[in-house]
């Protein structure tokens, strides 16, 4: 079945450690996105990528890094520079560089807790 | 700064009630507005609204956009416990490859 797979679903880390969240899609979508969701704040865009080997900062990119070496994969690293990393992280993809159909397809999310 | 605001943030009703969720937006170069339902983890797409005054309907859910007053509403009639979820609205900015999301409305339907 086509879809977006995020892993791990739950992750605990000690403060100061870098963490990498995986996002893989087999929908053949060009565009991929990372969002952070905190209670009462909706979804905020961290990074997005429209094409392989290219990505742009979103609204809250500080303390995060990404790569897009393959079309199917868009991993997110939460670095020790991120001051408040505990959150629910959602990866999404869409068909092309313009969100014309409105459908962002979301993964099931990764919940990161920093102790 | 582009902004999308939803209200109420939380709503608890009884099964069978009708609810109206609100979404207002202030964005430059507005293109369309989207509604998503998030039950547990992954948000699922409900509606995309681009034209003002045209109601979109899917079963007991309907939505409409007012581009003059810069808001949209999502109506759910004859609510069921399965409608319990967070409802998110988001604005698409013309020429941008990203969405601006509101805070979400957490809807709880009690039996």
Image: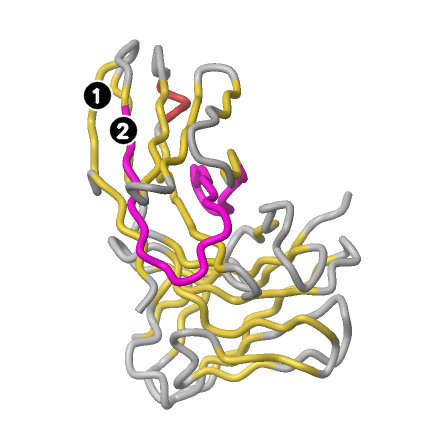
Q: Is residue A79 above or below residue A105?
A: below
- Indicate which disc residue A64 carries: none
Viewer-proximal residue, B6 or B110? Answer: B6
Q: Where in the figure is residue A114, as x and y percent of width and height?
A: 33, 74
The residue depicted at 35 percent of the width and 10 percent of the height is B78
The residue depicted at 56 percent of the width and 79 percent of the height is A56
Q: Which residues are magenta?
A: B20-45
Q: Where in the figure is residue A84, as x and y percent of width and height?
A: 29, 77
Q: Which residue is labeled 1 in the image? A: B13
Viewer-proximal residue, A1 or B101? Answer: B101
Looking at this view, name the residue that lies furthest to the front. Answer: B68
Q: Quadrant of the C terminus of chain A?
A: bottom left
Q: Main secondary structure of the magenta part?
A: strand
Disc 2 crowd, CA 10 A, few/some/many (<14, 14-19, 20+): many
SS category of the residue bearing label 1? strand
- Indicate which disc residue B108 carries: 2
In the figure, is residue A29 to the left or right of B59? right
The image quadrant of residue A99 is bottom right
Inspect the magenta stretch and tell me whether residue A105 lies in it. no
Tell me which numbered mark, 2 or 1, is placed earlier along the sequence.
1
Query: Which chain is home to disc 1?
Result: B
Inspect the magenta stretch and tell me whether residue B31 lies in it. yes
Query: Which chain is home to disc 2?
Result: B
Q: Is residue B49 above or below residue B104?
A: above
The residue depicted at 32 percent of the width and 51 percent of the height is B25
Disc 1 crowd, CA 10 A, few/some/many (<14, 14-19, 20+): some
Are discs 2 and 1 less than 8 Å apart at CB?
yes
Estimate the spatial distance between the alpha carbons at disc 2 and disc 1, rounded to whole Å: 6 Å
In the figure, is residue A84 to the left or right of A73? left
Q: Are labels 2 and 1 assigned to the same chain?
A: yes
The residue depicted at 28 percent of the width and 13 percent of the height is B15
SS category of the residue bearing label 2? strand
């Amino acid at each position: 079945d086509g879809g977006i797979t995020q892993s791990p679903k739950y992750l605990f880390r000690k403060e100061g450690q870098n963490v990498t969240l995986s996002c893989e899609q087999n929908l053949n979508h060009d565009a991929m996105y990372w969002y952070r969701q905190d209670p009462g704040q909706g979804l905020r865009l961290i990074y997005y990528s429209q094409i392989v080997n290219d990505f742009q900062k979103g609204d809250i990119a500080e303390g995060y890094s990404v790569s897009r070496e393959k079309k199917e994969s868009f991993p997110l690293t939460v670095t020790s520079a991120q001051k408040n990393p505990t959150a629910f992280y959602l990866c999404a993809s869409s068909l092309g560089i313009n969100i014309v159909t409105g459908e962002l397809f979301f993964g099931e999310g990764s919940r990161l807790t920093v102790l | 700064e582009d902004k999308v605001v939803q209200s109420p943030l939380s709503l608890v009703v009884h099964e069978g009630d009708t609810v109206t969720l609100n979404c207002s937006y202030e964005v430059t170069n507005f293109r369309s507005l989207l509604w998503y339902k998030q039950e547990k983890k992954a948000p699922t797409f409900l509606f995309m609204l681009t034209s003002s005054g045209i109601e979109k309907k899917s079963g007991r859910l309907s939505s409409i956009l007012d581009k003059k007053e810069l808001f949209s509403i999502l109506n759910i009639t004859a609510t069921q416990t399965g409608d319990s979820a967070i409802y998110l609205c988001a604005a698409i900015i013309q020429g941008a490859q990203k969405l601006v999301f509101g805070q979400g409305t957490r809807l709880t339907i009690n039996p």
